[in-house]
Structures are given as structure tokens and as C-alpha cells.
């Protein structure tokens, strides 16, 4: 009987010691690591602001079709009478694990950021080769999971002379839908 009493105490003490809050400088802070389970999250630091697709009326989505994987994260909130929306889109041709350059000139990896406040929408595009990286850490075709990290610089409208926004410490962990052409 005494042996049976120790089991719940041991399990409870393990549970209490593993519930501490992370204060490490490696904490996500809107990007970085993340899970690899298809949690449905895209996050990053946009400029100096931490951003995630899983806050408010938001979502992350991914689709794979004709050898292109598109990962899309969106946040949406209303402040007073103003709608504020941010979207990050990553497009990857022939996805596989490993690090790849982002940029229009690569022809295989693109990144965009769309920022909407009220009726004002600005689209920022990864405008040149080597404007960032995407590191696919998991590409699971049976479980349909894509996970990894990213960073990129983008300019308004893709204009090389336009305003540059840096997207850093990005991470994605999504399940994707696969479509086939008929």
C-alpha cells in the first residue's frame, strides 16, 4: 500500500517542477524555434514588433499544389473603428529540408508581407536574390507537416528603392492541404 502512495506524489512533484515559466533570452519573442507538430502557427518579428498568427481572429494555412508549397499566416484585430491586419506569405518551389535563399530572382522562394490599417494596404515583397532565408526543418509528406524558420527583407511594392521592412526570427509550423491538378 505504501508503494502505491508514492506514485501519485512522484507524478505530482514532476508536474510541478516542469511548469515553470521560461525567462530565457532564447524565448520565442515572436519567432525562432517553435514546434514541429503542425500546430498551425506562423510567427516573426516585423521590424521591432513581435507578431504571431495565433492571436485574435487569426490563422495559419498551408497548401501544396504543382510542386509549390504556400504558407500563409494572418493576424486580424479591430482597434476602435480601425481594422488592423498583417499577413505573411511564404512560397516555396519543390520544398525539402534545408536552407534556401529568398528572393524574386531565385525563381523558387518568395516572401511577402501585407499590412492593412483601415482602408490603407501596403504590400512588401522580397525584391532581390538573397534578401533572406527559409530553413525547412521538417517536411513530412505522410503527416503533411511543414516546419521551419525564416527571415527576409522586403520593400513596398517590390520596388528596390522603396521602404524596406525586415522580418526576422520567423517560424512556421503548419499542416498543409495537398491539391493535385486534373
Image (cartoon, helix red, strand yellow):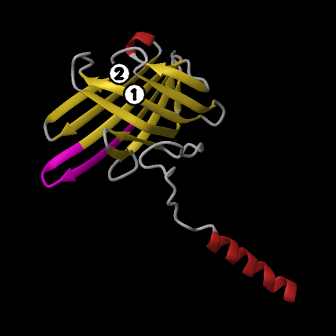
| Front position in the image: 147 or 98 | 98
Residue drawn at (47%, 49%), measured in percent from left and top? 28
Q: Quadrant of residue 6?
A: bottom right
Q: Is residue 77 magenta?
A: yes
Residue 118 percent coordinates (x, y) = 14, 41
- The CA distance from mark 2 to mark 1 is 7 Å
Q: Residues within 10 Å of mark 2 (few under 14, many from 20)?
A: many
Q: Quadrant of residue 126?
A: top left
Residue holding disc 2 = 126
Residue 93 relative to residue 165: left or right: right
**Residue 131, above or below 18:** above
Q: Are marks 2 and 1 in contact (CB under 8 Å)?
A: yes
Left or right of residue 35: residue 110: left
Residue 62 screen position, x and y as percent = 47, 33
**What residue is at 32 percent from the left and 25 percent from the top?**
154
Asked if 2 appears above or below 162 in the picture, the reply is below
| Numbered label attached to residue 109 | none
Task: Find disc 1 in the rendering and name its residue.
Answer: 152
Q: Quadrant of residue 15?
A: bottom right
Please say if 150 is above or below 81. above
> Which residue ends up furthest to the front in the rendered image?
25
Percent across and percent down for residue 59 are 39, 44
Q: Is residue 162 left or right of residue 171?
A: left
Which residues fall within the magenta stretch? 73-84
Q: Quadrant of the N terminus?
A: bottom right
Amino acid at each position: 500500500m505504501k508503494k502505491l502512495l508514492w506514485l501519485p506524489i512522484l507524478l505530482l512533484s514532476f508536474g510541478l517542477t516542469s511548469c515553470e515559466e521560461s525567462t530565457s533570452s532564447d524565448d520565442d519573442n515572436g519567432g525562432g524555434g517553435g514546434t514541429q507538430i503542425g500546430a498551425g502557427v506562423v510567427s516573426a518579428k516585423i521590424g521591432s514588433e513581435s507578431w504571431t498568427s495565433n492571436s485574435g481572429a487569426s490563422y495559419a494555412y498551408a497548401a501544396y499544389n504543382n510542386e509549390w508549397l504556400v504558407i500563409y499566416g494572418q493576424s486580424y484585430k479591430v482597434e476602435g473603428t480601425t481594422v488592423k491586419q498583417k499577413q505573411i506569405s511564404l512560397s516555396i518551389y519543390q520544398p525539402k529540408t534545408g536552407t534556401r535563399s529568398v528572393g524574386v530572382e531565385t525563381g523558387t522562394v518568395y516572401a511577402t508581407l501585407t499590412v492593412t490599417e483601415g482602408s490603407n494596404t501596403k504590400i512588401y515583397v522580397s525584391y532581390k536574390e538573397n534578401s533572406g532565408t527559409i530553413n525547412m526543418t521538417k517536411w513530412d509528406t505522410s503527416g503533411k507537416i511543414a516546419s521551419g524558420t525564416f527571415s527576409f527583407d522586403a520593400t513596398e511594392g517590390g520596388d528596390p528603392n522603396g521602404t524596406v521592412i525586415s522580418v526576422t526570427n520567423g517560424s512556421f509550423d503548419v499542416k498543409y492541404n495537398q491539391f493535385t491538378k486534373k
